[in-house]
Image (tube, helix red, strand yellow):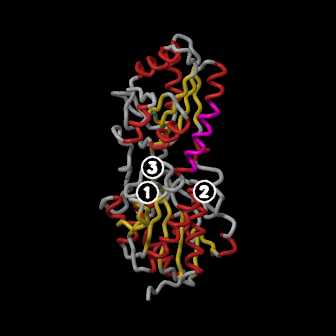
């Protein structure tokens, strides 16, 4: 009844642990339940544009459940509705090449597409649905900032890395009576820093949603020193900023869908604190992409399997332009237009509506046990 005989799948945007588990679930559900073929496009939408793909089977996806990364590879620079390329003078230009991708789907007899990714990747999925492609999105981000999702896969695995890192810097902070700063990812959303700092036992957590006062941080450290607690661990989100100030930008990547790369707030904070603390040693560590890699944790393996299977079911139920999710503890689909907004085609949505509530339960819990937010 669905008319689907061959499904395409791609992973776009930044990598994270759990992508392979979704690819596996899509493949196995399509083959075992519906008897259809699965084609995996390599390097996200670039594979769709350049017709670079591989056949997916039960055999080549059998052992990837626990593996981080993606066997399909990722790219976060290929918005086919606003494709960046260099002209003969080396200048970056843009053009809409989405029709080439749609023709490739037709030539390969692919009837439907499962797109796994974050804001930018799902925005393009929305736009392909507008052009008649049967498509279902699967939300992915370690930042946990997608609306209409209780939790996104990759987040829990990343939290495990952060929690272990806090444990490790705590021992060296204690041994040297120093301040240890741990910078984590999250862009403009603080869930990684908040949940990682809370579970790791940080003393101070700095979030994008709660601008900090450097002098309040100094006061907390001095108060701890006066009590004989001479080691202080600070977990800071890369998007944290001081009151009246701005984020620290590491670099600008002109040909990327997300041109602004954050990073460096930990080092900046360490330099400022050492000066204000009169010589107390302050060290900063940025754990960066370790948060994206490594073996997928049990929770994410299970979540990915549910979402991947749900995506195929949604296609065979005749749905398109929807995102599969578990929201309010209920498996369901939500319109991508609702999740991302109805912006212009080719316009990357920033999403991020699922940010930390400064007055919410988790922040209140942290304050209850004495964690400072520098405010």
Tag 3, which secondary structure?
A: loop
Tag 2, which secondary structure?
A: helix
Residue 169 pos. (x, y %): 62, 30
Q: How many marks?
A: 3
Residue 81 pos. (x, y %): 41, 63
In the image, the segment drawn in magenta is 157-169
The residue beneath circle 2 is: 298
The residue beneath circle 1 is: 120
Badge 1 vs badge 3, beta-carbon distance below 8 Å = yes
The relative height of residue 222 versus residue 29 in the rendered view (above or below) is above
Residue 202 pos. (x, y %): 52, 31
Camera-nearest label, 2 or 1:
2
Q: Residues within 10 Å of mark 3 (few under 14, many from 20)?
A: some
Residue 25 pos. (x, y %): 57, 70
Q: Residues within 10 Å of mark 2 (few under 14, many from 20)?
A: few
Picture quarter containing residue 344?
bottom left
The relative height of residue 71 versus residue 106 in the rendered view (above or below) is above
Looking at this view, is 236 or 351 the one in front? 236
The residue beneath circle 3 is: 258
Camera-nearest label, 3 or 2:
2
Q: Earlier in the sequence, mark 1 or mark 3?
A: 1
Q: Earlier in the sequence, mark 2 or mark 1?
A: 1
Q: Is any atom of residue 215 visible in this view?
A: yes
Question: What is the residue that sits farthest to the front in this orientation?
Answer: 368
């Amino acid at each position: 009844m669905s008319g689907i005989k061959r499904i395409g799948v791609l992973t776009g945007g930044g990598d994270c642990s759990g992508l392979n588990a979704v690819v596996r679930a899509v493949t196995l559900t399509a083959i075992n339940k519906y008897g259809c073929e699965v084609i995996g496009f390599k390097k996200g939408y670039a594979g769709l544009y350049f017709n670079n793909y591989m056949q997916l089977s039960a055999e080549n996806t059998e052992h990837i459940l626990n593996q981080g990364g993606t066997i399909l590879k990722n790219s976060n620079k290929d918005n086919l509705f606003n494709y960046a390329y260099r002209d003969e003078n080396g200048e970056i230009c843009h053009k809409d090449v989405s029709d080439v991708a749609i023709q490739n789907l037709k030539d390969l007899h692919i009837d439907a597409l499962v797109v796994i990714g974050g804001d930018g990747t799902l925005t393009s999925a929305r736009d392909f649905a507008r052009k008649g492609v049967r498509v279902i999105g699967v939300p992915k981000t370690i930042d946990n900032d997608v609306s209409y999702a209780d939790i996104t896969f990759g987040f829990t695995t990343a939290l495990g890395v952060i929690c272990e890192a806090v444990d490790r810097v705590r021992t060296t902070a204690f041994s040297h009576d120093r301040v240890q700063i741990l910078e984590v990812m999250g862009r403009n959303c603080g869930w990684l820093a908040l949940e990682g700092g809370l579970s790791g036992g940080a003393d101070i957590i700095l979030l994008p949603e709660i601008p900090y006062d450097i002098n309040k941080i100094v006061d907390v450290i001095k108060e701890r020193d006066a009590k004989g607690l001479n080691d202080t661990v600070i977990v800071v989100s890369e998007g944290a900023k001081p009151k009246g100030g701005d984020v620290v930008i590491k670099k600008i990547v002109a040909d990327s869908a997300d041109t602004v790369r954050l990073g460096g707030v930990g080092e900046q904070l360490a330099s400022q604190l050492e000066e204000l603390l009169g010589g107390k040693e302050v060290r900063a560590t940025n754990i960066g992409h370790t948060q994206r890699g490594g073996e997928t944790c049990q929770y994410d393996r299970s979540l990915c399997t549910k979402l991947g299977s749900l995506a195929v079911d949604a296609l065979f139920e005749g749905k398109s332009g929807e995102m599969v999710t578990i929201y309010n503890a209920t498996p369901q689909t939500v319109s991508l237009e609702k999740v991302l907004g109805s912006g212009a085609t080719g316009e990357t949505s920033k999403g991020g509506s699922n940010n930390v509530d400064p007055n919410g339960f988790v922040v209140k819990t942290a304050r209850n046990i004495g964690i400072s937010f520098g405010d």
